Amino acid sequence: MIYFQIEDNKGKVLAGNLHEYPGSIEFEIGKILAQRKGSKGIKGICDTSGDTKVTFLVKDEADLLKSSKLFKKTFQIYKNVANDVYRYYKKEIDGYAHILSTIQGQIRQKIDDFADSSEFHGESFAESVAKINNIINVDTRTAAQLICYVHKRMADMRAHLLGAEIIHSKGRYEVNLSRVSLKRAILNQCTPFLEEFDKNSVTVRFYFDDSQEIETDKNLFSLIMYNFFSNAVKYTKPASDIRMHYLDDQSCLDISMISLKMEKGEISDLFNEGIRGKYAKNIPGKGIGLFVIKRALEVLNKNRMYIDPDYQKDYQEDGLIYIENHFKFWF
């Protein structure tokens, strides 16, 4: 058995299965540790490679235990891979940092557009609150819109952070199940998108009782719904409804809508990272939403979201082809 671990220069584990080794071993950087009897035993080494630290351990692998040359060559391969892994994660982290920084800047700009921050200044907290209250009373509608905007951007940030954790957690996310109100849990993620739905005359309708509950992880359910509505905003036909049904006997949430056509042969691939549909090429997007939904459902140990298109009901508008699609979740 081969065990390895790749860490960054801060000790964060980036990849590996060393945690599965049934024991504890201390290594000295650059020194081979060996305990062998015939073809049985262990042999390992820990060394740095660029901005990473690589730990490599073999157990009961006769060829690697006997041949130092083969052991060193194999370890060198892992060290080379470590640098690629580090560059990949650094690129991912830099990407998320850029997204969060952009969102933060957009929130700040929106607040500055509402009122110059110097207008909030006071010699005490109470004075500052009073000034903000006066500013809000002058234009309550714009203030309410600002709160909605900040709420939406906070939802964006939470989804990006949790999405990154789910994609890269390698099974380390701890699921915390509890009973939740299905409608409230959906509205929690739907509400930040309502302004965009309103602009397109899209209405979200519920066809199950307010008291309906499911057992789920609140954070993962929120992540699933966030990514679902993020896609729905882009791909739902204007002037149409998004219909929420819950089939109690099947524990199935069935969401139906008239949305962008997906070919039957491409649906499975759309759950892979970076893959976009044939009819979505001219609509901005990165092909990440369904991938995150798939990963979150895997962490919950649930079936993949099932997409059931009705090709008999198709519509065309502004050069786009829409059909009635059903999206089914089993919770």
Image: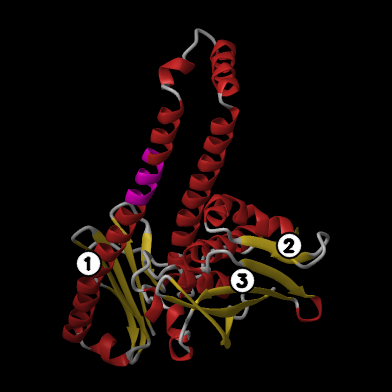
Which residue is at a point 24% across and 63% down the rendered structure image? Answer: 87
* Number of residues whose C-alpha sits closer than 10 Å to that of mark 2, classed few (under 14), some (14–19) or many (20 or more): many
Badge 3 marks a residue whose secondary structure is: loop
Nearer mark to the viewer, of 2 and 3 = 2
Res 304 visible:
no
Please tell me whether residue 24 is drawn above or below residue 187 in the rendered image: below
- The percent position of residue 331, horizontal first and vertical second, equals 69, 73
- The percent position of residue 75, horizontal first and vertical second, equals 23, 77
Nearer mark to the viewer, of 1 and 2 = 2
Specify start and end residues of the magenta stretch as a single range: 97-105
290 magenta-colored: no
Q: Is residue 291 left or right of residue 282?
A: right
Which residue is at a point 47% across and 84% down the rendered structure image? Answer: 267
Q: Nearer the viewer, residue 241 or 70?
A: 241
* Number of residues whose C-alpha sits closer than 10 Å to that of mark 3, classed few (under 14), some (14–19) or many (20 or more): some
Of callouts 2 and 3, the N-terminal one: 2
Q: Is residue 246 left or right of residue 59?
A: right
**Amino acid identity at mark 1:** Asn
Of callouts 1 and 3, the N-terminal one: 1
Please tell me whether residue 311 is drawn above or below residue 119 in the rendered image: below
Which residue is at a point 58% across and 32% down the rendered structure image? Answer: 141
